[in-house]
């Protein structure tokens, strides 16, 4: 609820204020008022309705105050500069290979308070990436794991632990480390549920992640290729439920070619799910190289 006041008959919006307590000044960011005997929250923060015009600190503040969904929409974008070399999990003549990423991309809102009861409330989930010209991209290409089989699932995968990274502080040479510092400063974890077991069925458990890739159900709304049970703990992202494209192109591909990209869902004892070049779900062995379309939340 917005708040305003009148001075000499002119209306002014109230977007902040200060008060003195014991001689110390404190910022006033919110309050309450009574209208017709009903109490209403007063939000004194001011956020630009154009997502890209806000800082990451402002975006995170709006999310944590439960205000983001009233200001922005699913699919809204913000520019992000990514710079770094991350491992692919492959080697050439005994030397590790890397994906070099350097440029400005768009991240976009996948959903507000997504699966909040299980994953965490008051969060905005974003996905990478889109080109500034509007083309859906994945960062190409990386293995899921160099190990034979899929035992341990997403939790134990090379992609999660060494390529994307799991630490905001110890992140050199990972995708997390290539993200801008102002974003990392406000990133929050989500409890992401996956089949982290073994065999053809495995067992579902949660990992605490700053950066992850989607599961099959989070993109397609159903589980057809993944092991049974995963979908009970997952929900489709609003962006994909509204028809968001599943076809992506390589971030460094000059041939304008559709590319496959990984999902974190185990398909069986040997394969993980992925999105094929036609935008459909399929499965492949974990040592194959596909693109990455990471997700994070603030």
Image (cartoon, grey):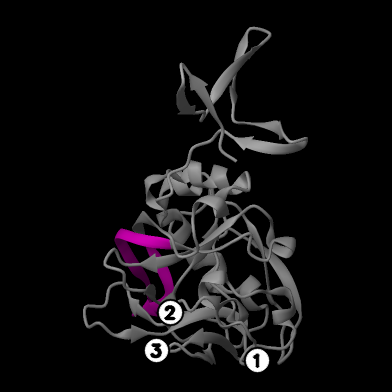
Report the front residue among 85 and 284: 284
Where residue 2 appears, x then y in whole percent?
A: 56, 38
Regarding residue 128, the answer to whether it shows in the image is: yes
Q: How far apart are marks 1 and 3 (CA)?
A: 21 Å
Range of residues picked out in magenta: 85-107
- Among numbered discs 2 and 1, the one appearing first in the sequence: 2
130 on left or right of 22: left
In the image, residue 200 above or below residue 43: below
Residue placed under numbered mark 2 in the picture = 245
Residue placed under numbered mark 1 in the picture = 268
In the figure, residue 204 lies in which quadrant? bottom right
45 on left or right of 245: right
**The disc label shown at residue 277, or none:** 3
Where residue 171 appears, x then y in whole percent?
A: 49, 54
Which residue is rendered at x = 36% and y = 69% of the image? 98
Which residue is rendered at x = 62% and y = 43% of the image? 65
Q: Classify mark 3: residues with Cα within 10 Å, few (<14), some (14-19) or many (20+).
A: some
- Among numbered discs 1 and 3, the one appearing first in the sequence: 1
């Amino acid at each position: 609820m917005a708040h305003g006041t009148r001075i000499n008959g002119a209306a002014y919006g109230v977007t902040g204020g200060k008060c003195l307590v014991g001689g110390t000044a404190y910022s006033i960011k919110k309050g309450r008022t009574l209208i017709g005997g009903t109490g209403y929250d007063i939000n004194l923060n001011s956020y630009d309705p154009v997502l890209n015009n806000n800082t990451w600190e402002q975006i995170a503040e709006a999310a944590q105050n439960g205000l983001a969904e009233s200001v922005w929409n699913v699919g809204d974008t913000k520019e992000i500069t990514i710079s770094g070399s991350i491992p692919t999990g492959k080697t050439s003549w005994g030397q590790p290979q890397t994906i070099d990423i350097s440029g400005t991309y768009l991240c976009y809102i996948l959903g507000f308070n997504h699966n909040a009861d299980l994953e965490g409330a008051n969060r905005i989930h974003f996905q990478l990436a889109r080109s500034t010209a509007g083309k859906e991209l994945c960062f190409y290409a990386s293995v899921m794991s160099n190990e034979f089989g899929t035992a341990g699932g997403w939790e134990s995968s090379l992609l999660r632990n060494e390529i994307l990274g799991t630490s905001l502080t110890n992140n050199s040479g990972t995708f997390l480390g290539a993200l801008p510092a102002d974003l990392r400063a406000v990133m929050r974890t989500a409890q992401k549920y996956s089949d982290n077991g073994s065999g053809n069925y495995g067992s579902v458990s949660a990992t605490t992640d700053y950066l992850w890739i989607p599961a099959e159900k989070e993109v397609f709304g159903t589980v057809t290729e993944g092991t049974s049970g995963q979908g009970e703990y997952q929900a489709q992202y609003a962006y994909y439920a509204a028809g968001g494209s599943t076809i992506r192109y390589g971030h460094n591909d000059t041939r304008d070619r559709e590319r496959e990209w990984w999902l974190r869902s185990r398909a069986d004892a040997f394969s993980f799910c992925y999105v094929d070049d036609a935008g459909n779900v399929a499965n492949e062995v974990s040592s194959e190289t596909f693109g990455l379309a990471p997700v994070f939340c603030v």
